[in-house]
Image (cartoon, rainbow, N blue to C red):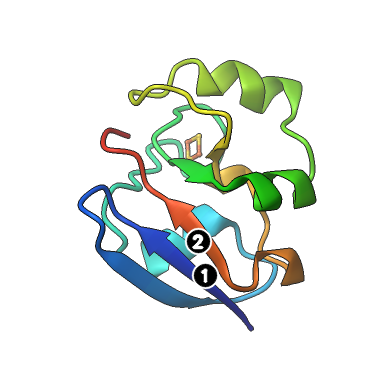
Amino acid sequence: MTDVTFILPDGTQHSCIAQEGLSLMEVALQNSVSGIIAECNGAAACATCHVIVDDSLARALDPVSEHENDMLDFAAAAREPGSRLSCQIRVDARLNGATIRIPAET
Ligand code: FES
């Protein structure tokens, strides 16, 4: 199991035990983390699962695909260097102890 903590826009922290193999979006929904809407249910077609990861996690994760990169331009919140679609991140050991920021608008 992998421990991840979502940080909501108001600073509230929501720690979760994440099952490996799920997407980070699925973990957020399972744990009722507000701000992750996931209208397209993980098809990388809505950008309502936008999250921000810190620099070290961004470097550790697989790179953003061309499609994910295009979709991030449609996210409601301003894009940041650590912006990712949480549906495109699979939980594995690289995420253990990670903090994932939820932007103010998704
Ligand atoms: Fe729609 Fe991630 S759930 S882009």
For the residues marked 2 and 1, what is the alpha-carbon distance in whole angstroms? Answer: 6 Å
Left or right: where 95 falls relative to 66: left
Q: Which mark is residue 4?
A: 1
Identified at 26% across, 47% down, the residue is 9
Q: Is residue 72 above or below residue 98?
A: above
The percent position of residue 97, horizontal first and vertical second, equals 59, 72
Q: Pick whichever, 45 or 106, lies toward us.
A: 106
Circles 2 and 1, Cβ within 8 Å, touching? The answer is yes
Left or right: where 62 falls relative to 98: right
Which residue reaches farthest left? Answer: 10
Identified at 27% across, 33% down, the residue is 105
Residue with the mark numbered 2: 99
The percent position of residue 32, horizontal first and vertical second, equals 30, 65
Element type at mark 2: strand
**Foreground tag (2 vs 1):** 2
Which residue reaches farthest bottom? Answer: 1
Q: Is residue 95 above or below residue 55?
A: below
Quarter the N terminus occupies: bottom right
Labels 2 and 1: the sequence-earlier one: 1
Q: Pick whichever, 103 or 55, lies toward us.
A: 55
